[in-house]
C-alpha cells in the first residue's frame, strides 16, 4: 500500500524504526507482532500531547516525539508495517470509559471518546485489528489488562479492568481508512471537546497523564 500524508511509511525514520525492530525476521506475522509491541511500549500514550496541527496525527512525528495518543500511535504501526510490505490501514470507533482520569473526564465533558483509533493489518489472508494505544507501564499504573497481539486474533480493549470494573465499551464503529481522515477528525474534536482542544493546544498539561492514576 502506498504511503499517505499521515501514514507516511516512506519516511526515513519510520522505515529505519521498522527495520531495526524486525531485523533478521522475514515472517510477516512475527514482524507484525514485533512492530506492535515496539509501538505499544516504545511510544508513551499521552492524551495531553496533541492539538490541531497535523504533526500530532502523523506517524513519523509520533515516532520522533516518542509520545502521542491513540490516533498517531495507530498511524505509526500502520506506517511501519507498510514500510515492510505488510498491507495496513487505520480503523476508528467511539468508546465509552476510555482509560481516563477525573481531570481528563472533566476536560472531555463525559466518558465518550470519539474517533478512538486502532490499526488493521493484513496477515495470512485476513485483516486483523491491533490496538497499540496504552503502553505496558501505563496499564500497570491504572490497573488495566495490557492488550496483547499474536497476529492471528483481534486485539481490542477489554470490557473490564483487573479489579472487575467496567473499563471499555465500543459504542460506534466508524470504519477503516487508508490514511488518517484528519479534517473530519479535527472538526469533530473541536465541536465535541472544546475544552480539551484548548488545553492540548496550550501544552499546559502535556506529560502529566500517568501521574493522575
Image (cartoon, helix red, strand yellow):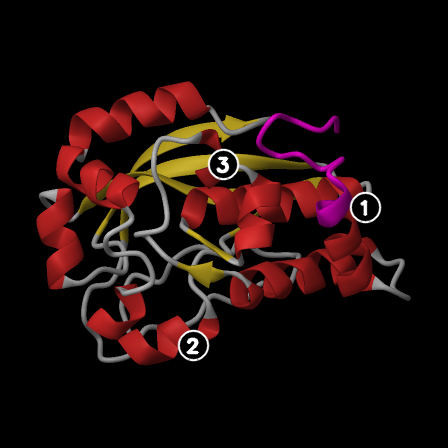
Q: Looking at the rendered structure, which numbered label has been put on residue 175? A: none
In the figure, residue 171 lies in which quadrant? top left
Closest to the camera, between mark 2 and mark 3, is 3
* Front-most of residues 36 and 50: 50
SS assignment at label 2? helix
Q: Is residue 181 visible?
A: yes
Magenta segment range? 1-14
Residue 54 placement, left or right of 35? left
Q: Looking at the rendered structure, which numbered label has been put on residue 55? A: 3
Alpha carbon of mark 2 to alpha carbon of mark 1: how far?
28 Å
Please tell me which of labels 3 and 1 falls first in the chain: 3
Q: Which residue is mark 1?
A: 84
Please tell me which of labels 2 and 1 falls first in the chain: 1
Q: Which secondary structure type mostly characterizes the magenta part of the structure? A: loop
- Identify which residue is drawn at 37% across, 73% down: 139
Q: How many neighbours does mark 1 have within 10 angstroms: few (below 14), some (14-19), or many (20 or more)? A: some
Q: Is residue 143 visible?
A: no
Q: Which residue is mark 2?
A: 137
Residue 34 placement, left or right of 209? right
In the figure, residue 120 lies in which quadrant? top right
Across and down, in percent, residue 118 comes to 48, 45
Alpha carbon of mark 2 to alpha carbon of mark 3: how far?
25 Å
Alpha carbon of mark 3 to alpha carbon of mark 1: how far?
23 Å
Across and down, in percent, residue 99 comes to 27, 60
- Identify which residue is drawn at 82% across, 56% down: 19
* Front-most of residues 48 and 213: 48
Amino acid at each position: 500500500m502506498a504511503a499517505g500524508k499521515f501514514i507516511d511509511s516512506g519516511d526515513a525514520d519510520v522505515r529505519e524504526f521498522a527495520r531495526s525492530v524486525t531485523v533478521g525476521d522475514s515472517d510477516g506475522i512475527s514482524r507484525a507482532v514485533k512492530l506492535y509491541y515496539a509501538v505499544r511500549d516504545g511510544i508513551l500514550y499521552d492524551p495531553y500531547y496533541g492539538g490541531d496541527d497535523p504533526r500530532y496525527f502523523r506517524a513519523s512525528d509520533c515516532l520522533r516525539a516518542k509520545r502521542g495518543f491513540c490516533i498517531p500511535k495507530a498511524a505509526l504501526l500502520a506506517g511501519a508495517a507498510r514500510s515492510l510490505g505488510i498491507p495496513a490501514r487505520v480503523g476508528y470507533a467511539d468508546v465509552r470509559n476510555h482509560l481516563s482520569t477525573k481531570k481528563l473526564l472533566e476536560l472531555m465533558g463525559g466518558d465518550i471518546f470519539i474517533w478512538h483509533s486502532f490499526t488493521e493489518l493484513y496477515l495470512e489472508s485476513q485483516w486483523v485489528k491491533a490496538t497499540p494505544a496504552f503502553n505496558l507501564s501505563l496499564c500497570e499504573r491504572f490497573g488495566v489488562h495490557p492488550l496483547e497481539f499474536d497476529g492471528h486474533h483481534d486485539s481490542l480493549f477489554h470490557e473490564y479492568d483487573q479489579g472487575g470494573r467496567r473499563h471499555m465499551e465500543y459504542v460506534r464503529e466508524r470504519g477503516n481508512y487508508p490514511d488518517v481522515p484528519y479534517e473530519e477528525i479535527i472538526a469533530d474534536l473541536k465541536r465535541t471537546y472544546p475544552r480539551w482542544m484548548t488545553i492540548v493546544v496550550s501544552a499546559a498539561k502535556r506529560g502529566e497523564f500517568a501521574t493522575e492514576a
